[in-house]
Amino acid sequence: MAGDWLAARRSEVAADRILDAADELFTRQDAATVGMHEIATAAGCSRATLYRYFENREALYTAYVHREARRLYEELTRQVAGLSDPTQRLIEGVMTGLRAVRDSPALSSWFATASPPIGGEMAEHSEVIRALVEAFVRSLGGGGDGIERRARWLVRVMVSLLVFPGLDEADERAMLAEFVAPLVVPVHQPAD
């Protein structure tokens, strides 16, 4: 077989390498302060090469957030797979997501309080995050009206807890059970 056997994946591999370099920078400093020049240097490429894959900083940030959101969603679905009670699924899913962001220096930098948290802005406007959270809310059962609105509200709750955490994990679980689950988990009507 002649030719460049990596040609089909070369762009994907290069973009991932750039996003990995950005991840390393986000680990060391707030995401909002990381510039394209720094990312190009960390990735070992020129700014021209960087801009070939990401037209601007917003496009790079969006690609990074979407990649990490997909990874987080996969982890979250594995954690709640064995739970059948929708309220338990909701609480464990949210706690898994919060823990994953807090445990990652790169992801937690998106919610730094020293400047406006760009993670909240990304979460609010990301179609990928919206779709993933809507899928999670659908997995709690029910369906029908309000899934999109409940998913948007759940994203806001999570951003709020990332920026303004509860006293501890037990406090956050209690708040989720008392204030969030009743509004997000569908109420099943008993059969007549």
Image: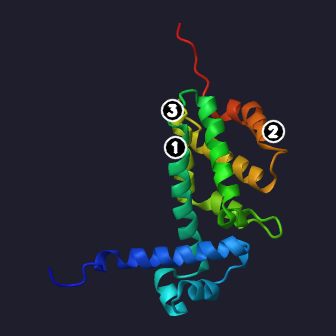
Q: Which residue is mark 1?
A: 77
Local SS, label 3: loop
Q: Earlier in the sequence, mark 3 or mark 1?
A: 1
Q: Secondary structure at mark 2?
A: helix
Residue placed furthest toward the top: 192
Foreground of the two, 79 or 123: 79
What residue is shown at x 73% (from left), y 75% (from top)? Answer: 29
On residue 110, the disc is none
Q: Which mark is residue 171?
A: 2
**CA gap, disc 1 and disc 2:** 23 Å
Residue behind mark 3: 82
Which mark sits nearer the N-terminus, 1 or 2? 1
For marks 3 and 1, give the CA distance. 9 Å
Q: Quadrant of the N terminus?
A: bottom left
Real-space Cα distance between discs 3 and 2?
A: 24 Å
Q: Amino acid at mark 3?
A: Gly
**Horizontal and vertical percent position of residue 17:** 49, 77
Q: Is residue 183 left or right of residue 2?
A: right
Indicate the quadrant where residue 68 lies. Answer: bottom right
Residue visible at 47% across and 81% down in the picture: 53
Q: How many marks?
A: 3
Near mark 3 (Cα within 10 A), the count class, few <14, some 14-19 or many ≥20, is few
